[in-house]
Image (cartoon, rainbow, N blue to C red):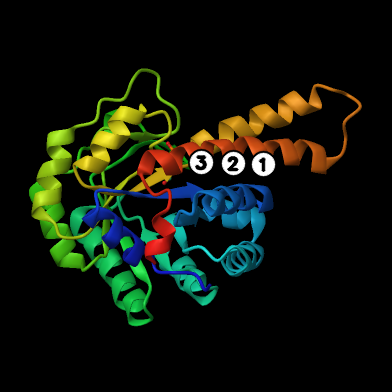
């Protein structure tokens, strides 16, 4: 099948208190790991790239591989651009078939953020592409963006409502206690805040920084209204470990061996996350 709209996935997931897992991929093997796991569990998935990944792998290659995967595996796959600060890059993503995009203006002040997001919404929605926005500031490291703990700011529910109304976005990333990258201690999620935001806004909510969040907390976040769960670091770590482990045998130099091991390691985590999000078997509903 062709790539699907993320919004369609998120809307149906949130109605059923499920969330769509969104995996940050980096190369052929990570894409294969995600789609093979999704196919085996009959789950829809969102495959997402950051600007850094496109710089590394090239939008032409990435988009062609993901589109081909959707055809070959015949499961609902959305291709999403994650944390993009640039209007022009988003135009390019749409040109290459992305079905949703995140415009990240969280570093701007409120009015500038709204203006940037509105301009993307107007352009993207005109061609049927959905837009994720962020209000509040999620801490941690993603690509070359670093938000220090002290600069992270929780999303204020009333501000979230105004932001959604002012911009017309299709989904909203919120800061409720998670951060990008691994945690030093156990992250404390603000569940009442998720619930309060969910009551005030009528678009699906997105949880960033899900790596390292205990399963019970992710489940509870989904129960309180999170409809998209972003996972990046928890795929990178087992991939790196599998490669290091395989290459500890100095006779191995074949990329198919160490990248094959990496793909299997990533696939196992993807399966766990699909089950955690409750979307095993959910592909049949699309
Ligand atoms: P993690 O690296 O913490 O999983 O965060 C992923 C993310 O939120 C991508 O936007």
In the rendered image of this protein, does residue 252 appear above or below residue 169? Answer: above
Residue annotated with mark 3: 271
Which residue sits furthest top? 185
Q: Say which residue appears at 13% left-offset and 56% top-offset.
A: 201
Residue annotated with mark 2: 267
Q: Quadrant of ligand 1?
A: top left
In the rendered image of this protein, does residue 71 appear above or below residue 16? Answer: below
Residue annotated with mark 1: 263
Label 3 and label 2: CA atoms lie apart by 6 Å
Label 1 and label 3: CA atoms lie apart by 12 Å
The image shows residue 238 at horizontal and vertical percentages of 60, 31
The image shows residue 147 at horizontal and vertical percentages of 36, 37
SS class, disc 1: helix
Q: Residues within 10 Å of mark 1 (few under 14, many from 20)?
A: many
Q: Residues within 10 Å of mark 3 (few under 14, many from 20)?
A: many
Q: Say which residue appears at 39% left-offset and 69% top-offset.
A: 5
Q: Are marks 1 and 3 in contact (CB under 8 Å)?
A: no
Q: Nearer the viewer, mark 1 or mark 3?
A: 3
Which residue sits furthest right? 251
Between residue 283 and residue 186, name the one nearer to us. 283
Q: Say which residue appears at 17% left-offset and 34% top-offset.
A: 191
Label 2 and label 1: CA atoms lie apart by 6 Å
Between residue 255 and residue 93, name the one nearer to us. 255
SS class, disc 2: helix
SS class, disc 3: helix
Q: Are marks 2 and 1 in contact (CB under 8 Å)?
A: yes
Tell me the number on the disc at residue 188: none
């Amino acid at each position: 099948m062709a790539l699907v709209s993320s919004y369609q996935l998120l809307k149906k997931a949130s109605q059923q208190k499920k969330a769509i897992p969104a995996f940050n991929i980096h190369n052929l093997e990570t894409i294969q790991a995600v789609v093979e796991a999704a196919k085996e569990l009959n789950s829809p998935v969102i495959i997402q790239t950051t600007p850094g990944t496109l710089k590394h792998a090239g939008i032409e290659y990435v988009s062609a591989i993901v589109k081909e995967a959707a055809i070959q595996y015949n499961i609902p796959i959305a291709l999403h651009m994650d944390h993009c600060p640039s209007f022009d890059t988003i135009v390019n993503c749409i040109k290459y078939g992305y079905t949703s995009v995140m415009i990240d203006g969280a570093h701007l002040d409120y009015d500038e953020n709204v203006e940037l997001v509105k301009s993307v919404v107007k352009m993207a929605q005109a061609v049927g592409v959905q837009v994720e926005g962020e209000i509040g500031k999620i801490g941690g490291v993603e690509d070359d963006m670093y938000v220090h703990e002290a600069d992270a700011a929780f999303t204020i529910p009333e501000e979230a409502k105004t932001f959604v109304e002012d911009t017309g976005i299709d989904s909203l990333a919120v800061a409720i206690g998670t951060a990008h990258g691994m945690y030093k201690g156990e992250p404390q999620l603000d569940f009442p805040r998720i619930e309060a935001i969910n009551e005030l806004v009528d678009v699906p909510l997105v949880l960033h920084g899900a790596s390292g969040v205990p399963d019970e907390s992710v489940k509870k976040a989904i129960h309180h209204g999170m409809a998209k769960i972003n996972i990046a670091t928890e795929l990178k770590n087992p991939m790196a470990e599998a490669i290091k482990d395989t290459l500890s045998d100095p006779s191995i130099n074949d990329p198919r061996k160490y990248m094959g091991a990496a793909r299997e390691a990533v696939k196992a985590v993807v399966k766990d996350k699909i089950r955690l999000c409750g979307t095993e078997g959910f592909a049949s509903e699309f």
